[in-house]
Amino acid sequence: LAFLQGLFTSYHEGYELACEFEPYKQQLQFNLQNARNNFESTRAEVERLMKRIRSAEDDFKAPSCFTMEGFLYIQEKRPLGSVWTRYYCTYEKSSKMFTMGNTEVRPASRQPNGVVNGTPEMFKLRSCVRRKTDSIDKRFCFDIEVVERHGVITLQALSEANRRLWMEAMDGKEPI
């Protein structure tokens, strides 16, 4: 009899505890449902924006007197490896002039205002070849040869679509 009394008491205490936590459980269910609804609407919005961005990349046309312009990363070889530096580059197809101006922000100890404002370098383009994906650890790369320098300059575009536009503007070729 004592065993059954203890069992019923334990059951009754559990029932009272469940009733006591019922508002918290309902609030948690409400919060989870709101989170699920917010996630679904946010995901749909992100997918819509991603489609819009992708279609904008495909429709891009340079809005200036240059055939192509934009940011490119240029590989600078150093004694202990190489460094990729961001440059604002322009290309004019009729004269085959490629211009690159450094826009990297440097520590204030090196420059008075922290921004490098050197004169842009201008080169006459000799050739442009897409870089094989397995030949370099970066994506979206292509090499150019210029009259003023020996060897190649390795450039990295911001995306595959951007690289295609640069290659098309420079009459780029596929690697052999």
Image (cartoon, rainbow, N blue to C red):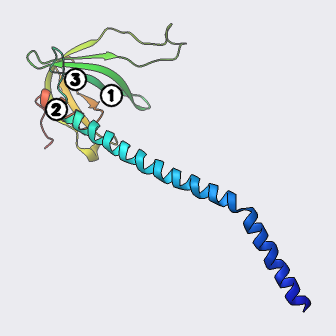
Camera-nearest residue between 3 and 65? 3
Residue at the spot x=28%, y=32% of the render?
157
Q: Which residue: 22% across, 39% down? A: 131
Q: Nearer the viewer, mark 3 or mark 2?
A: 2
Residue 73, numbered circle: 1
* Looking at the image, residue 85 lies above or below residue 161: above
Q: Position of residue 138 (x, y in %)?
A: 33, 40
Q: Amino acid at mark 1?
A: Tyr
Q: Position of residue 27 (x, y in %)?
A: 63, 55
Disc 3 marks which amino acid?
His
Circle 2 residue: 167
Label 2 Cα neighbours within 10 Å, binned few <14 / some 14-19 / many ≥20:
many
Q: Amino acid at mark 2?
A: Met
Q: Nearer the viewer, residue 17 or 83?
A: 17
Residue 32 lies in quadrant: bottom right
Residue indicated by mark 3: 150
* Relative side of 119 to 81, left or right: left
Q: CA distance from mark 3 to mark 2?
A: 21 Å
- Mark 1 crowdedness (10 Å alpha carbons): few <14, some 14-19, many ≥20: some
Task: Give the quadrant of the N terminus.
Answer: bottom right
Disc 2 element = helix
